[in-house]
Amino acid sequence: MSTDSTLNSIITTRIAQQGRITFAEFMAACLYTPGLGYYTSPGRKVGAEGDFYTSITVHASFGRVIAREIAQMWRSMGTPADFTLIECGAGNGRLACDIMDYLAEREVQLYAGLKLVLVEQEPTLESAQREMLSAHLDRLAWLSPDKFASENFTFSGCLYSNELIDALPVHRVVMTSDGLKEIYVTCKDGLFTEEAGEPSTPDIEAYLKRIAVELHPGQQAEVNLNAPKWLASASRALQRGYIMTIDYGYPAPELYTPLRKLGTLLCYYRHQTEENPYIRLGLQDITAHVDFTTLMKCGEDLGLLNVWFGEQYRFLLSAGIIEEIEEIERSAIAEEEKLRLRLALKKLIMPEGGMGDTFRVLIQSKGVNAPKLLCQRRIGG
Ligand SMILES: C[S@@+](CC[C@H](N)C(=O)[O-])C[C@H]1O[C@@H](n2cnc3c(N)ncnc32)[C@H](O)[C@@H]1O
């Protein structure tokens, strides 16, 4: 039986037992059913042979700029002897490798007391991460998402993630003349269909109330209850330091604008976007844009300070991408290769049409006095 049909029968059986399931349950099954889900089955997801590109696949400079900022975070904390980096949703370890390579080469004192903990929903990625990070094996540790969220785990340093939150299962809602309803997934004549019903949990209305969002009649939207839950675990574990979240998304007024009448749910399959999540189960990615206002508001409630929030291109430009480009220009590589790299890097920082605009960076801190970071510098200043 193909992945598609095995997952189909697992989900159909669940629906037959329960009558209907929330979209969040459907999405969780498609992405994370052990051995069958999009992220929990073998095969390349990211890059040319996969289904989508992330900033990491563009060039190592992305990770190197993040590493520059991490070194600045360490300085802002008074150059502690021990500093832990945590990457959540580390995938194959490419970003972690670019960051560690930079720190080993340029920040010897920080690297000497550095530990890197990789947290990944898919445990079999550990072997790819080991291989990718073979030069840094003595610094590495692995932690399951459950252990990460448990009471016992604490750290000081920086927790970062790239495109983690957009991969967390979301609830879907629609505003009707009869008030806010949740969109459920059910089965009719062997096909998945959607039906609206009362919200499965009061947390959905509380979520929208917290960010003062009132949907317009007919408007659909996603509600990511897993995002504040994840941030609460991250914030509880963090003793002192930073949480850096990189993802595509918007502040709530932009995300929940009536102009986005159908929300932002999107699927990716072999570099094509697809709007129908009910096909190619386990073979296509399903994502939704991130609501950064919720991360900021919840962060405040959890005692985090919102240090910086903005477009990825602004972050990269003020935190060091120009220096990275200058280094490439000064290097001995062939002119043709320099041109190729220049074009690749342009993708990361182009405000329009590139990855620099829809992608945003949020940096939150805890227990650091008046943090001064590179991204707070004026661009070109
Ligand atoms: C869109 S991919 C991004 C991978 C990588 N960060 C990149 O940018 O190429 C999302 C990753 O997050 C992982 N993931 C999902 N939920 C997670 C959780 N709660 N904790 C850690 N990793 C998680 C998935 O298995 C997947 O590898």
Image (cartoon, grey):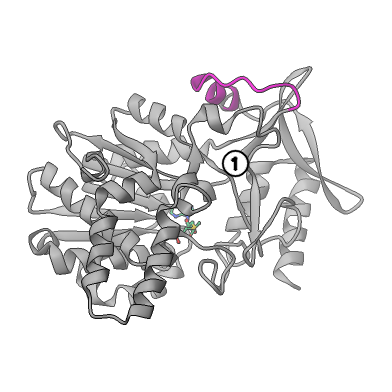
Magenta residue check for 206:
yes
Query: What is the secondary structure assignment of the residue under circle 1?
Result: loop
Q: Is residue 69 left or right of residue 190?
A: left
Residue 59, quarter of picture: bottom left
Specify whether residue 89 is in view: no
- Residue at image position (56%, 33%) is 255
Specify whether residue 101 is in view: yes
Going by the numbered disc 1, the residue's amino acid type is: Val
Front residue (pair 254, 285): 254
Question: Residue at the right extreme?
Answer: 189
Residue 137 in the image: state x and y as whole percent. Answer: 24, 73
Residue 193, quarter of picture: top right
Front residue (pair 111, 6): 111
Task: Specify the segment rendered in magenta.
Answer: 204-218
- Residue at image position (66%, 65%) is 283
- Residue at image position (46%, 70%) is 124
Residue 159 in the image: state x and y as whole percent. Answer: 30, 49
